[in-house]
Amino acid sequence: MPGGQNSGGQNIEVLDLSLMPLRDANARLQGDAKSAGAFFKVINPRGAHALACGLDSEIEVEVEGHTGYYCAGMNKLARVVIKGNAGQGVAENMMSGEVRVTGDVSQSAGATAHGGLLVVEGNAAARCGISLKGGDIVVKGNVGHMSMFMAQAGTLVVLGDAGDALGDSLYEAQIYVRGSADNLGADCVEKELREEHREKLRDLLGKAGCSDVDVSEFKRFGSARALYNFKPDNVDAY
């Protein structure tokens, strides 16, 4: 379905999920999109699950409305903007590219992501960044309990507050929280915020559209590395 041009002069193809099956829309984005144009707008998503999954080319996708679970999962190279809220597992297992949600997200946002950037302009529910493996997540609101559980690499930046058990059993991932983080998970401790970390923060905040935020207002959290190997002295922490 034709749709004119965006402000950058790109041709826009509109995919209306009230008129076409989700399977056909995803097939269009995944297969034909590489040669058919760079910009797609999905309208009437009506909470569709697994929308815009498995993208692997440098296209842009705007979703006009709320989505269900696993939207933009396994993203590679594409830029996906969800103009609404997103359900469980948004941007799960992302490899590269960018996923941005203008509203709130449900639990497990950015789970297992290996690369790329997830920006949540609202709040994120429980287990945000669980088992993160290298991606970056910026949440402009709050995150729920058990966020970054067993995160191995990558970064979570929270401009609001963090819920209980933040960073439980994490490895080498980094967490920055501007608000409160009063109940840390097992083996998660506050660490020094050095200039190298401030530079990383400035870069991520700039990409997220928050370049005016003072990085000195954040606290940095990471692993105490006490659980890397089993030690009887640490048994109460397991």
Image (tube, rainbow, N blue to C red):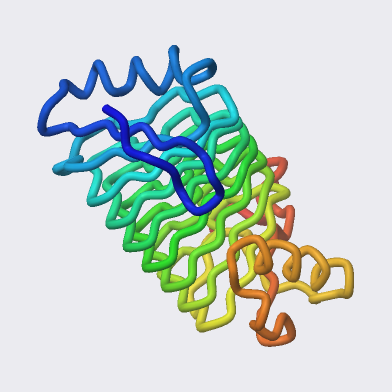
Label total for image: 0
Compared to residue 167, the image places residue 150 above or below, namely above
Percent position (x, y) of residue 15? 27, 31
Residue in the picture at 59% in, 46% down: 151
Query: Would you say residue 118 is visible in this rendering?
Result: yes
| Residue furthest right in the image | 195
Q: At 53% across and 76% down in the image, what residue appears? A: 159
Closer to us: 60 or 96: 60
Left or right: residue 40 versus residue 42 is right
Decide which of 233, 46 is in the foreground and name it: 46
Q: From this viewpoint, is residue 238 visible?
A: no
**In the image, residue 107 lies at what x, y percent?**
33, 51
Residue 12, placed above or below residue 144: above
116 or 167, nearer to the observer: 116
Residue 176 placement: quadrant: bottom right
Counting from the top left corner in percent of width and height, residue 218 is at: 66, 80
Residue 195 vertical placement versus 171 (above, below): below
Where 29 sits versus 170, above or below?
above
Q: Quadrant of the N terminus?
A: top left
**Residue 201 picture location, percent across and down:** 73, 68
Residue at 88 percent of width and 67 percent of height: 196
Question: Which image quarter: residue 25?
Answer: top left
- Residue with the most extreme left position: 18
The residue positioned 68% from the left and 62% from the top of the image is 204
